[in-house]
Image: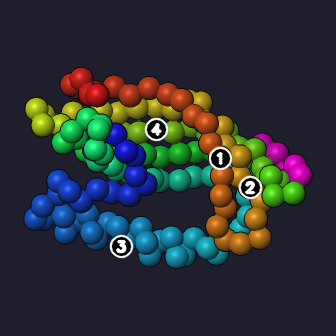
Amino acid sequence: MLYLGHLTMLLLTGRVRRSAKKLVWFFLICCSCASAQTRLEEGGHELQVWTGGGHSVPGGTSDTSLWNIGLRYGWILTTPHGPGFLKGRFEYALDVIPAFLVFQPANTSYGAGFNPFDLKWNFATRGSIVPYAELSGGFLVTNHNVP
C-alpha cells in the first residue's frame, strides 16, 4: 500500500464526503494560523492532532484503502546542534491512534494503536516550515486480518 499524508476521498460518498471536505477546510484554516507559533525550544512540548490516508497502488494489495487519525505528544530534548544544514533539535514523542480503518473488498477493519517509540530530528530552519526525519515503532490492533 502507498501511504499518503492526506485523507483519501475514493470511498467516501454523499454526506460523509461533504463532512470530510469541511474537516479538511477546517484543518487548512488552522494551519494558516499555526505559522504564528514560536520555535521549538529545549524542554518544550509539542501537541499534534493528525490524520492520514492511502490507497492501493499497481502491483500492491488491490482495492484496499485506509484512513487514520491520531494524537501526538512530544518533548524537545536538546538545543539546536549539528553541522550546517543538519543542525537541529532532538525530540521524543508518543502517538495514540484511536481510529485506524482499512477498507478491503471483503470487509472494513477497525483498529487502534499506540507508538511508544518515536524519535524525531527537527531541522533548524529560519522559515515557518520545519522539515524533520523520524523513526517510530508501535503496534496496531484490528478486528479483522489486514494485509
Image coordinates for residue 8, horizontal then vertical, percent: 28, 56
Q: Are marks 4 and 2 in contact (CB under 8 Å)?
A: no
Identify the residue under disc 4: 96
- The amino acid type, in three-letter code, at marker 4 is Val
Give the structural element (helix, strand or loop) at label 2: strand
- The amino acid type, in three-letter code, at marker 1 is Ala
Q: Quadrant of residue 113?
A: top left
Mark 4 and mark 2 lie on one chain; the one further toward the N terminus is: 4
Q: Label 2: few (<14), some or many (≥20) within 10 Å?
A: many
Q: Residue at x 35, y 67 (%)?
A: 24
- The amino acid type, in three-letter code, at marker 3 is Trp
Q: Quadrant of residue 36?
A: bottom right
Over which residues does the magenta segment extend? 77-83
Q: Is residue 99 left or right of residue 35?
A: left
Q: Are marks 1 and 4 in contact (CB under 8 Å)?
A: no
Give the structural element (helix, strand or loop) at label 1: strand
Identify the residue under disc 3: 25
Q: Label 4: few (<14), some or many (≥20) within 10 Å?
A: some
Q: Residue at x 83, y 54 (%)?
A: 87
Identify the residue under disc 1: 133
- The amino acid type, in three-letter code, at marker 2 is Phe
Give the structural element (helix, strand or loop) at label 3: helix
| Magenta stretch: includes residue 111 | no
Q: CA distance from mark 4 to mark 2?
A: 24 Å
Q: Are marks 2 and 1 in contact (CB under 8 Å)?
A: yes
Residue 41 visible in the current orientation: no
